[in-house]
Amino acid sequence: MQITPNFHRIGGFVNQYLIIDGKDLTLIDAGLSSNAKKVLNYLIANGFDLKQVKRILVTHSDTDHYGAVNKVREATGAEVWTSQLEADAMRIGSSSRPIVPSGFFKLIMPLLGVFLSSPPTFVDKIISDGETLPILGGLQVIATPGHTPGHLSFYLPNERILIAGDSINESKGKPVPTTDATTFDPERARKTFKELMHLNPSIIACGHAFFDLRN
């Protein structure tokens, strides 16, 4: 779905986002392993050559965000970029923090083990807080720990688009911090949320929610 001429949302269980910078494409997150076909089909259906995808930015090392990275990289030749903490986990097919489910999820987690597993995934480039990537006039890298220790978000100041991964979620139609049982540090997650909202974004593109605040 085109959000702006240079920014697309590929919806699903987890949202992926596509930044278009001339002929170069940047994919942010890739979804579960089974999601690779959907991402590739979206690119083809919208008239892109798969080789236009130059990089895949990963917000964090949960399998629903990077499980399909290997398959998408194989099809496109794209590099994979993320933070050091998340890269260390991805290289062993893990998450960067233990997930301790509660309630209903505690009962079904053993059944979801295979579904939620991820293959070891090599990261080509480590990116850090404060960097500005040469993407669409400058894509800012923001460390947003809380949900995971090395979580990253990305901001396009020229268009006021914030790609927040799982550092922001939704409740009653409004953006809120992610503080559920899968969150590494709920207190830090709340602080991160406040810092991100101070950017006053017009679009907040999250893993499991989307907010268009332009109207």
Image: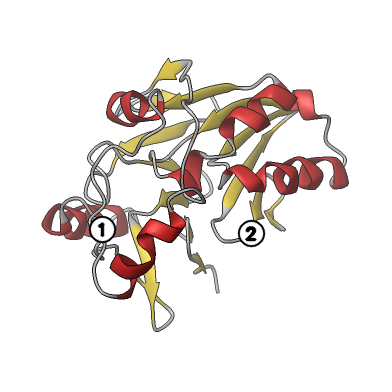
For the residues labelled 2 and 1, the Cα–Cα distance comes to 22 Å
Residue type (three-letter) at the residue carrying disc 2: Gly
Q: Earlier in the sequence, mark 2 or mark 1?
A: 2
Question: What residue is at 38 percent from the left and 66 percent from the top?
Answer: 108
Q: Quadrant of residue 128?
A: top left
Left or right of 190, for residue 91: right
The N terminus lies in quadrant:
bottom right
The image shows residue 19 at horizontal and vertical percentages of 63, 40
- Whether residue 52 is visible to the viewer of this picture, yes or no, is yes
Nearer to the camera, 200 or 172: 172
Q: Which residue is mark 1?
A: 193
The image shows residue 14 at horizontal and vertical percentages of 54, 56
Nearer to the camera, 71 or 28: 71
Circle 2 crowding by C-alpha within 10 Å: few under 14, some 14–19, many from 20:
some
The image shows residue 4 at horizontal and vertical percentages of 67, 54
Left or right of 10, for residue 127: left
The C terminus lies in quadrant:
bottom right
Q: Which residue is mark 2?
A: 11
- Whether residue 157 is visible to the viewer of this picture, yes or no, is no
Residue type (three-letter) at the residue carrying disc 1: Phe
